[in-house]
Amino acid sequence: MMTIAIIGSGNVGGALAQRFIEVGHTVLVGARFPLSEKSIKLATKIGEDRFTSPARAVAQAEVIVLATPAMKTIEAVQELGDTTGKVIIDTMNTVRGMGPAGFSNTTDAILANTATHDVVKCFNTTGFENLLNPQYGEQAADMFVAGDSQWGKTVATQLAREIGFAECYDLGGNDKFTLIEQLALSWITLALFQGYGRGMAFAVLKR
């Protein structure tokens, strides 16, 4: 079992915190404002004792999950403290140009502002409802991961499978960060803008 620091207590961070706890991991939530409305809402589900500052959460963790607003990426990373030897999983997306200044995607911004190279993007391609429950009848949704770090991919893949995703497909290295964000935008477009609703997910079919 792992100790995981989740930075961000909104829908995505909250969903992953709940699921990782359910499958047996130790979870700490790093929040700048632990008494904010969204933090209190999550605390009622997982316990107030799991909340601390981002730096304290990171210091105790092996894995860091970033789930803050994309525009706050650099600011959030700079509050993590020493990330040497830790895996960072980026769950964020730059949508409609709203991302970290000077970067086309959030993961490149993380890599430019952290001590670890074990940074991957995962859990970004679907809505938080599917993170809470990826099961659709007898079939489960698939997850996707990208990044150069094989260790990071191994960790993200393990976590995705543990919380119920059928498979976690490897889309490639750091050069695929934009591609995996485009996959996220495809889900957002279908679910929200085209009116298909949030109760949908991607799955790969193979003969």
Image (cartoon, rainbow, N blue to C red):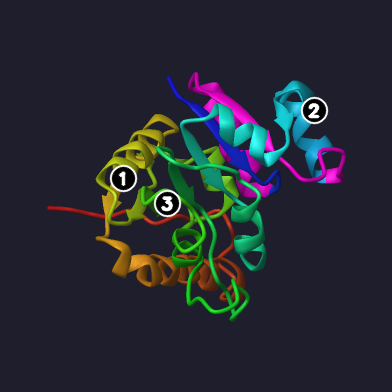
Dividing the picture into quadrants, the one containing residue 163 is top left
Q: Indicate the position of residue 118 as horizontal and vertical percent values.
A: 36, 47
Q: What residue is pinned by disc 2?
A: 44
Along the line of sight, which residue is nearer the eye, 30 or 96?
30
Quadrant of res 71? bottom right
Q: Residue at x 59, y 62 (%)?
A: 197
Judge left or right: residue 70 versus residue 172. right
Q: CA distance from mark 2 to mark 1?
A: 31 Å
Residue 78 lies in the magenta-colored region: no
Q: Disc 3 marks which amino acid?
A: Cys
Location of mark 3 (residue): 122
Residue at which label 1 appears: 153
User: What segment carries the magenta color?
Assistant: 11-37
Asked whether the beta carbons under mark 3 and mark 2 sit within 8 Å of each other, the answer is no
Mark 3 Cα-neighbour bin, 10 Å: few <14, some 14–19, many ≥20? many
Residue in front for this viewpoint, 62 or 26: 62
Proximity of marks 1 and 3: CB atoms separated by less than 8 Å: no
- Describe the element under mark 3 as helix, strand or loop: strand
Look at the picture and state if 64 lies above or below 61: below
Discs 2/1, front = 1
Crowd band around label 2 with a 10 angstrom C-alpha radius: few (<14), some (14–19), many (20+): few
